Image: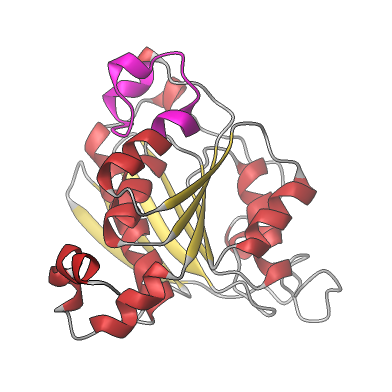
């Protein structure tokens, strides 16, 4: 690290669990963020500010007026602009040293698996089960840690999946049995809730990359903003899981 980097990240380097070695790990890391909406906005900004060396941003959507209530990485002047372009510009304002690669088209299963394999961690900030299941399968196939988050109405949840054979993985938690997606456009969302969940995802990502503390691997953190309550529950692996189950040929 040079003198400017030591100064920029000094408050973080002061933390014994991170230090110079942890900061160097962040600078050398690559993180894939899928979804640049309410969750992806704080994730991208905090990871850039924290000094993650390379960010891969994936989102095929464009900025809409209804997004601005909660997707704080975008501004009014960005309406109609690809979200990845808007997010990249904001990330570069926060930290010009961060290398940013953008994908503004829907990644198919093969392309997504390729990008997951290129990353040290993948952060799922998507809003539908189909994408979440695809990201999870790629995580297990490549052994890439997955930091998962979701939020709707007043509630949110965060977990970390190690991307290892034997799980638990995301599909152990939510089997692919025809779940109906609930969307913010149909159910509403309190703006700070996605900020809280996205910030927790960024925190867990930094811990995964640096080895600091204990992550939420094997645990699901649940947040209820209306009652201002937190719960943490243990997650069990499913031996019959088609993605991570022992003996499954697709598991990495």
Asked if residue 240 is positioned above or below residue 114 in the image, the reply reads below
Residue 219 position, x and y percent, is 43, 71
Residue 39 position, x and y percent, is 38, 43
Asked if residue 77 is positioned above or below residue 125 in the image, the reply reads above
Q: Which residue is nearer to you in this view: 53 or 241?
A: 53
Residue 69 position, x and y percent, is 27, 23
> How is the protein colored in the picture?
secondary structure
Asked if residue 59 is positioned above or below residue 23 in the image, the reply reads above
Residue 199 colored magenta? no
- Magenta residues (range): 66-87
- Residue 175 appearing in the image: no
Left or right: where 182 falls relative to 40: right
Q: In which quarter of the image is the C terminus?
A: bottom right
Left or right: where 251 falls relative to 29: right
Left or right: where 45 falls relative to 123: left
* Residue at 26% over, 32% down: 190
Q: In which quarter of the image is the N terminus?
A: bottom left
Q: In which quarter of the image is residue 139?
A: bottom right
* Residue at 42% over, 28% down: 184
Residue 144 position, x and y percent, is 60, 69
* Residue at 42% over, 73% down: 209
Residue 71 colored magenta? yes
- Residue 113 appearing in the image: yes
Q: Which residue is nearer to you in this view: 104 or 221?
A: 104
């Amino acid at each position: 690290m040079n003198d400017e980097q030591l100064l920029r990240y000094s408050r973080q380097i002061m933390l014994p669990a991170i230090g110079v070695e942890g900061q160097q790990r962040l600078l050398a890391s690559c993180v894939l963020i899928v979804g640049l909406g309410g969750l992806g906005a704080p994730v991208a900004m905090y990871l850039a500010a924290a000094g993650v060396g390379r960010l891969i941003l994936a989102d095929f959507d464009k900025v809409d007026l209804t997004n601005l209530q909660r997707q704080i990485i975008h501004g009014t002047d960005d309406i109609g602009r690809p979200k990845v372009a808007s997010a990249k510009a904001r990330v570069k304002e926060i930290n010009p040293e961060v290398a940013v690669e953008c994908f503004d088209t829907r990644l198919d299963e093969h392309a997504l698996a390729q990008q997951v394999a290129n990353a040290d961690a993948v952060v799922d900030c998507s809003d539908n089960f189909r994408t979440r299941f695809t990201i999870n399968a790629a995580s297990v196939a490549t052994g890439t840690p997955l930091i998962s988050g979701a939020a709707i109405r007043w509630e949110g949840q965060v977990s970390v999946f190690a991307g290892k054979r034997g799980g638990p993985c995301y599909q152990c938690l939510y089997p692919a049995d025809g779940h109906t997606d609930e969307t913010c456009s149909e159910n509403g969302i309190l703006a700070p809730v996605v900020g809280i969940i996205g910030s927790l995802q960024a925190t867990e990502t930094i811990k995964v990359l640096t080895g600091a503390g204990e992550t939420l691997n094997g645990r699901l953190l649940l947040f209820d903003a209306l009652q201002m309550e937190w719960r943490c529950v243990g997650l069990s692996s499913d031996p019959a899981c088609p993605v991570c189950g022992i003996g499954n040929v697709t598991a990495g």
